[in-house]
Amino acid sequence: MNDPNTSRIIDVLIAGAGPTGTTLAIDLVRRGLNVRIIDKAPHSFEGSRAKGIQPRTLEVFDDLGTIDEVLAASSDYPRLGIHLGPVAAPWRMFRNRERTADVPYPNTRLIPQYRTDSVLHDRLDQLGGRVEYGWELVEFVQDSTSVTATTTGDGGTEKITARYLVGAEGGSSAVRGQLGLSFLGTTDEQDRMLIVDAVTTGLTRDRWHTWPGVKGRFAGACPLPHSDLFQWMIRLAPDEEPPVGVEAITRRIQAHTRNRNIELSDIRWRSVFRPNIRLAEAYRRGRVFLAGDAAHVHTPAGAQGLNTGIQDAYNLGWKLAQVFAGADPQLLDTYEAERLPIAAGVLGLSTKKYEGIAKLDPSSLRRGKDEQQLSLTYYGGPLAPTNCDRTTTLQVGDRAPDAELLDTNGASVRLFDAFRGPHFTVIAYGRDATIASEELKWPNAGAPLRRVAVDAGEDFRRIYGIKGDTLLLIRPDGYIGHIATRNFLTSIQTAARALTPVAQQETAR
């Protein structure tokens, strides 16, 4: 990261220091890029707006070096306690699963957003970066080589020139607005929900308490892990004025729950939420990109928005770094091509869940593999053509699963250990595939290549659907970039050209 007073051109300017923007900053900084990340808020977010971390996002955090802190700060989701008069019926949203060889983090984790932000900001600090709070991006101009942004803060006005700009500043994104991109979708002004983080007494902390009501009205209280806080969600009537202050909010909750033992104190955060269901018409204009809520906003049902934004950043980061290293700039076009359809599908899922909750549909309370985002694929996109080889279980564009292997000393190791870091990985199974892997030339510029030869491992063969000699190229974001079951060297060299610097290829370091 650079000194705010410098005037030299930086690589990337990121507007917005929530989970999406900070994830992107971490990924770019660890790749050696010069990055600045600004946020107009005076300090980091203090609420628990997004609180569910899906298994695929946990894998991203594993790669970025934050998984231990996230797991320590989170918990498994509690069962629901659906209050029907004097009875509270238990209901399991998730069927907690045991870790398997291919899915090391099988369960969605509950963690308030302020803790997620804190973990990510700490990691950025460890890498030598920092968030610049109190700086707002007000306008920008771009040409064929750079973007110059005007920012304002307590220190006055500063112009920042960067090769690329990424807007990750939420649903009201100034970057998206200046680009003139439509934010297609709906906002229901009559459907409002009061969200409150507060110390609460009179409830057990082993349940996510819900109280259904008529006409879709409900109240819910979710215990936030490792704290004395609950997040309250109170659906308001169309003409109802949201209560303000701890006494008024407590009275509103007691009236709905018919439980006068519930008492609130020490409100940490309060917001009135309206369900936005919107998708930007494009994720890029020239040298300016959108990510996270700046590109798509969701209902809170299903815990999809934050996770989708983090994976936007994870998709974009390595591509930006590769283009800086000399890859064809058309690689950046694949960001929108891969991520926009994913966001559209996730919007449909979260919207369906939210509508089901309003109708008291029990199925809307369940969470399964669709929400966990492990099965999302880029198959059929520009980097995953349908005419590639495949295995019996995987195709190009799919998530590369984990697997347990034995090293040369007979000790158990994870395939994710080989993936961890800002590099590509080539996995070779069988003699001919291994020879091709060893002969594969790789550019010295850009993300390096790690080579893994697998000569045994029943779990690996089963999970990866391997029947014979196979060569797989794994992208830096953990998706399969190529599968070859024949013509190993020629096939993988052709695939690598779209992903790597265009310079003369040399043997990898």
Image (tube, grey):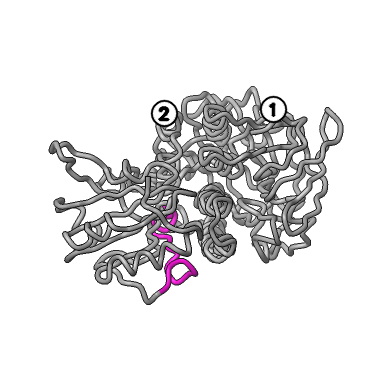
- Residue 462 can be seen in this image: no
Which residue matches tag 2?
Answer: 72
Circles 2 and 1, Cβ within 8 Å, touching? The answer is no
Q: Which amino acid does label 2 sit on?
A: Ala
Looking at marks 2 and 1 on the same chain, the residue that comes earlier in the sequence is marked by 2
Indicate the secondary structure of the residue bearing disc 2.
Answer: helix
469 horizontally vs 309: left or right: left
Q: Residue at x 60, y 31 (%)?
A: 129
Q: Residue at x 53, y 47 (%)?
A: 310
Indicate the secondary structure of the residue bearing disc 1.
Answer: helix
- Residue 436 can be seen in this image: yes
Q: Residue furthest bottom?
A: 387
Q: Quadrant of residue 153?
A: top right
378 part of magenta stretch:
yes
Residue range corresponding to the magenta coloring:
368-385
Q: What residue type is labelled 1?
A: Val
Q: In this view, does 222 lie above or below 283?
A: above
Q: In which quarter of the image is residue 462?
A: bottom left
Q: Count residues near mark 1 (Cα–Cα under 10 Å), then give few for <14, some for 14-19, many for 20+.
A: some
169 part of magenta stretch:
no
Foreground: 202 or 384?
384
346 horizontally vs 176: left or right: left
Q: Count residues near mark 2 (Cα–Cα under 10 Å), then give few for <14, some for 14-19, many for 20+.
A: few
Which residue matches tag 1?
Answer: 246
Percent x, y of residue 76: 39, 37
